[in-house]
Amino acid sequence: MQLRGDAGRRPLPLVTTPAYDAGMPPRRRTDPGLGRAALAAWRADPEGVDRATRGTAVRYTLEELGARAPGRSVEVRVPPFGAVQCVEGPRHTRGTPPNVVESDAETWLRLATGEQRWAQALAEGRLRVSGTRAHLDALLPLTDLAPAQPPAPAQPPAPSQPPAPSQPPAPASDTGDPR
């Protein structure tokens, strides 16, 4: 039986690929160069950095976590700057996920850079954690997020001295020709 309006339409192809490919890293929204620069600015002056820079540093570190621990079983939230789903395992499809970590921006950046330990942040009540998979202490800190140490300044060149002659100068010719 053909319904009105269906004439000439082909059936939709069957989609056989999963909606989530665990082998694919998440798409980056924050340029890594800008993210590292924002993180370096935050590390240099955590209290004095502006809100936009702090937000960029948070989003960059969240994306790094997602890239290093791909999956969708844990949601890490740092309101109002961002959230990421990470860690392999059972994933949620609707509503609030069963494994959630929530933190303020300062605590998250301190955890990501190793300036604060997971257990200390939990004890101080700076993290809200729910679910059996929501302990990220094995994944933090994201140690190589710190900018590389600048190279040591090059030694100034030694004062220039004329090179020592390797051979004595040739004697001037004394042929007596005045030309």
Image (cartoon, rainbow, N blue to C red):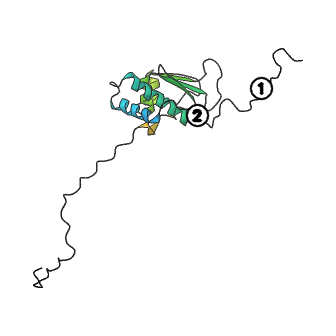
Q: Earlier in the sequence, mark 2 or mark 1?
A: 1
Residue 151 horizontal/vertical position (percent)? 33, 46
Q: Nearer the viewer, residue 82 or 110?
A: 82
Q: Amino acid at mark 1?
A: Leu
**Residue placed furthest toward the bottom:** 175
Q: Residue at x 54, y 32 (%)?
A: 66
Q: Amino acid at mark 2?
A: Pro
* SS of the residue under disc 2: loop
* SS of the residue under disc 1: loop
Depth check, mark 2 against mark 1: the one in front is 1
According to the picture, the residue beneath numbered tag 2 turns out to be 70
Residue 131 horizontal/vertical position (percent)? 58, 23
Q: Residues within 10 Å of mark 2 (few under 14, many from 20)?
A: many
Q: Residue at x 51, y 35 (%)?
A: 139
Q: Nearer the viewer, residue 37 or 75?
A: 37
Contact (CB < 8 A) between labels 2 and 1? no
Q: Which disc, if any, is residue 12?
A: 1
Q: Nearer the viewer, residue 81 or 165?
A: 165
Query: Can I make out residue 50 in this image?
Result: yes
Query: Can I make out residue 141 in this image?
Result: no
- Quadrant of the rendered structure where residue 5 is? top right
- Marks 2 and 1, Cα distance to the nearest angstrom? 31 Å
Residue 20 horizontal/vertical position (percent)? 65, 31
Q: Residue at x 53, y 32 (%)?
A: 28
On-image quarter of the C terminus? bottom left
Q: Is residue 2 left or right of residue 90?
A: right
On-image quarter of the N terminus? top right
Residue 71 horizontal/vertical position (percent)? 60, 31
Q: Residue at x 87, y 18 (%)?
A: 2
